[in-house]
Image (cartoon, grey):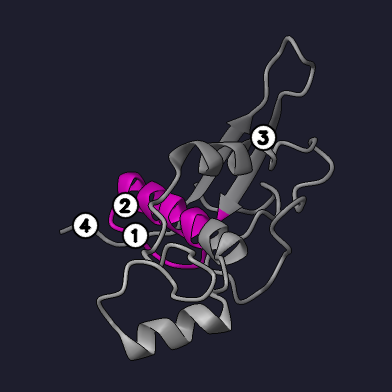
Amino acid sequence: MGALKQYTLVLNFGYVESQRLSYMPWSSKAKFKDAKEALLDLANWLKERYLAENAAEPKKCCIKTKEKDPEAVYCSKCRRELAEPEFDGEEFSDWLRQLDTDIDSFHGLIEWDPNHRWQSDGLEGMPN
């Protein structure tokens, strides 16, 4: 097995016709066996960020209903469905497209945080 290495991946967003074509370089200090593994990790990290930002908080009445009856499908008080919503790929795609600010503002929806495993810092000095 080859040596693990760091990767910087560049994602392209926008359309030439709308004059909003931009790029976002993402780098990680983590090491991967190949570019495919790095890309899959970035995709999963972006999905995790999306889910964390769009998670619906259950109402107190829904929590109480689930505690009383773990098999319940609907809340006994507000009639809200208690099942976890399915992942919506179209909404995720829309969220990703909202990242296409412009070349000068990489941090539109994801705040820079040194603890994130992927950063959108720029390309200078980054591994590729």
The reply, left or right, for residue 118 in relation to residue 74 is: right
Q: Where's the N terminus, which quadrant?
A: bottom left
Identify the residue under disc 4: 2
Q: Give the amino acid type for the residue marked by disc 3 in the picture.
A: Tyr
The residue lying at 75 percent from left, 47 percent from top is 106
Q: Quadrant of residue 72?
A: bottom left
Is disc 3 placed on a helix, strand or loop? strand
Residues 7 and 58: in front is: 58
Q: Give the amino acid type for the residue marked by disc 1 in the picture.
A: Phe
Q: Tell me where residue 32 appears, x and y as whole percent.
A: 34, 59
Q: Tell me where residue 121 appears, x and y as whole percent.
A: 70, 55
In 3D space, how far apart are the residues under numbered discs 1 and 2 (Cα atoms)? 6 Å
Identify the residue under disc 2: 37
- Which callout, 2 or 4, points to the residue nearer the camera? 2
Identify the residue under disc 3: 23
- Which callout, 3 or 1, points to the residue nearer the camera? 3
Residue 32 - label: 1
Examine the residues drawn in magenta and state their main secondary structure.
Answer: helix
Please tell me which of labels 2 and 4 falls first in the chain.
Answer: 4
Residues 76 and 64: in front is: 76
In 3D space, how far apart are the residues under numbered discs 3 and 1 (Cα atoms)? 22 Å
In 3D space, how far apart are the residues under numbered discs 2 and 4 (Cα atoms)? 13 Å
Answer above or below: position of 34 versus 111: above
Answer above or below: position of 89 versus 30: above
- Few, some or many residues within 10 Å of mark 2 (<14, 14–19, 20+): few
Is disc 4 placed on a helix, strand or loop? loop
